[in-house]
Image (cartoon, rainbow, N blue to C red):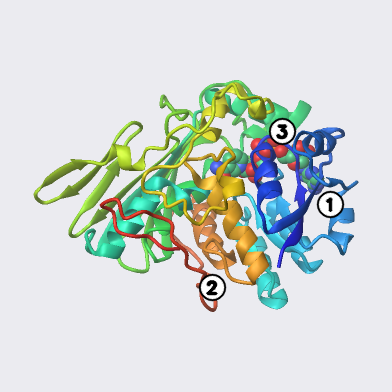
């Protein structure tokens, strides 16, 4: 059954999703609210949405709105998600799910008690590398996965200064010091969406920033954070480990590739760098760059991207990769730009179909917790000098997760999720 959606937050990222929610055949009206005057009106006008609501409270009090999509700043999601669920609304949340273990537990409790859909919009879940990895695991060509790497490398000078100024207003420096390991879901999600396991232990190492411009200054930071580059090593229940890097001061072209993955199995391995990707067996190496490369579906100069900082636009214009099976994507959506290596259409479609059909989406509350909690604990480890800490696990989603095709069989093995 189709449904009505309310978007909370009409900032930079909402520009990419408003037209997709609006176009999905299972979503009727789309409403929007924002605390900064004019932003919701502008989004509604640009994308011909149904209209605006005066506040988040008004939105969740409206019985005509069935679901809420949270596009607010990264440390604000969990409280809004719990309030929306408790008000009887399904919830789509941008990443991360939360920034404290307790608030993540509150979301899981609320989902369990209400039976509503919660989904985290983790773009790495549909990253072509993750789709490729799942396919190779499914065919047995990886063998037993025992080690992986997932990095999210995005330098502050490549768009983040402008993004934080837009987002944080006059006090932007206090927010721009957001701790790298509290934004862990792209790097962890791209590993654990392939490897069906969960983290048991974490060690984090952080590098204090040296730029001296008031960002990552503990006296200024609302997070009491001076770390701009961090690395974490995780032990997993299945036996093995993976490493993530969350870098914000790095000489690396994040506009070419900001999330990169490596999977090592007993029979085969996959390695990705900014501009290439390889599949290895004991016999040799195969260049699979073209299989996991996305092809631009629109120009960075397109007026649709006028609200996005120029340095960030490349991330939003990517199309699909050959490994993506786009047959499940409704035609109305497929005609529009996607982004983050082809993932946006899949995320909107996952949420729309889960709400409409009352099914459990792939990145449900339990999976989202597994993508998020390890980063929170690794950040604690950084603050405790690299102490090896236990990572709590909320378990897997009860019941079945809806499975639908995601990958083509272009020499990869068919991935269904
Ligand atoms: N690859 C990805 O998955 C990806 C990429 C970019 C951004 N994001 C996430 O998307 C989210 C939004 O990012 P952004 O860059 O658009 O941020 P932004 O600061 O540009 O936009 C957030 C908007 O939310 C509004 N807002 C905050 N609290 C509100 C409330 N209680 N009620 C109504 N409006 C409220 C703000 O006024 C602002 O306009 C972040 O959490 C970010 O982590 C994810």
Q: Position of residue 399 (x, y in %)?
A: 53, 79
Looking at the image, which residue is at 25% across and 53% down?
Answer: 264
Name the N-terminal-most of marks 1 and 2.
1
| Disc on the earlier residue, 1 or 3 | 1
Residue 388 visible in this rendered orientation of the protein: no
Check disc 2 and report the residue beneath it.
397
- CA–CA distance between discs 1 and 2? 28 Å
* Residue at left offset 67%, top offset 66%: 356
Q: Secondary structure at mark 3?
A: helix
Is ligand 1 closer than 8 angstroms to the Cβ of mark 1?
yes
Question: What's the CA distance linking mark 2 and mark 3?
Answer: 33 Å
Task: Say if disc 3 is inside 8 Å of ligand 1.
Answer: yes
Q: Report x, y in % for residue 409.
A: 31, 55
The residue lying at 52 percent from left, 36 percent from top is 227
Residue 167 is tagged as: 3
Q: Point out residue 120 in the picture as x, y percentages from the top left corner.
A: 60, 56
> Which residue is disc 1 drawn over?
56
**Residue 115 in view of the camera:** yes
User: Residue 155 vs residue 33: left or right?
Assistant: left
Quadrant for the C terminus, please.
bottom left
């Amino acid at each position: 059954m189709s449904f009505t959606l309310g978007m909370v937050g009409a900032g930079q990222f909402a520009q990419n999703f408003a037209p997709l929610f609006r176009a999905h055949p299972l979503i009727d009206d789309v409403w929007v609210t924002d605390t900064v005057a004019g932003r919701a009106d502008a989004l509604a006008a640009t994308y011909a949405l149904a209209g605006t609501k005066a506040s988040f409270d008004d939105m969740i009090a409206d019985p005509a709105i069935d679901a809420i999509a949270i596009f607010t700043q990264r440390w604000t999601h969990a409280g809004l998600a719990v309030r929306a669920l408790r008000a009887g609304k399904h919830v789509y949340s941008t990443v991360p799910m939360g920034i404290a273990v307790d608030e993540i537990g509150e979301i899981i409790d609320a989902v369990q008690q209400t039976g509503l859909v919660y989904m985290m919009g983790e773009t790495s879940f549909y990253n072509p590398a993750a789709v490729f990895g799942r396919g190779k695991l499914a065919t047995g060509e990886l063998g037993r996965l025992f080690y992986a790497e997932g990095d999210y490398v995005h330098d502050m000078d490549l768009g983040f200064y402008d993004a934080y100024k837009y987002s944080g207003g006059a006090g932007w420096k206090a927010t721009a010091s957001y701790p790298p390991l509290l934004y862990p879901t792209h790097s962890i999600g791209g590993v654990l969406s392939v490897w069906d396991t969960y983290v048991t232990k974490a060690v984090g190492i952080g590098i204090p920033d040296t730029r001296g411009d008031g960002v990552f200054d503990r006296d200024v930071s609302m997070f009491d954070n001076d770390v701009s580059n961090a690395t974490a090593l995780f032990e997993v229940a299945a036996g093995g480990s993976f490493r993530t890097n969350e870098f914000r001061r790095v000489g690396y072209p994040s506009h070419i590739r900001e999330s990169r993955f490596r999977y090592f199995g007993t029979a085969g391995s996959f390695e990705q760098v900014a501009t290439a990707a390889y599949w290895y067996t004991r016999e040799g190496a195969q260049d699979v760059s073209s299989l996991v490369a996305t092809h631009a579906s629109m120009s960075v100069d397109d007026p649709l991207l006028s609200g996005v900082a120029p340095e960030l636009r490349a991330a939003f214009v990517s199309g699909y990769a050959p490994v993506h099976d786009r047959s499940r994507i409704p035609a109305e959506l497929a005609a529009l730009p996607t982004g983050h290596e082809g993932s946006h259409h899949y995320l909107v479609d996952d949420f729309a179909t889960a709400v409409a059909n009352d099914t459990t989406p792939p990145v449900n509350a339990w999976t989202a917790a597994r993508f998020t909690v390890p980063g929170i604990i690794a950040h604690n480890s950084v603050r405790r000098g690299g102490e090896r800490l236990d990572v709590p696990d909320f378990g897997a989603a009860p019941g079945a997760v809806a499975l639908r095709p995601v990958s083509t069989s272009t020499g990869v093995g068919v991935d269904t999720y």
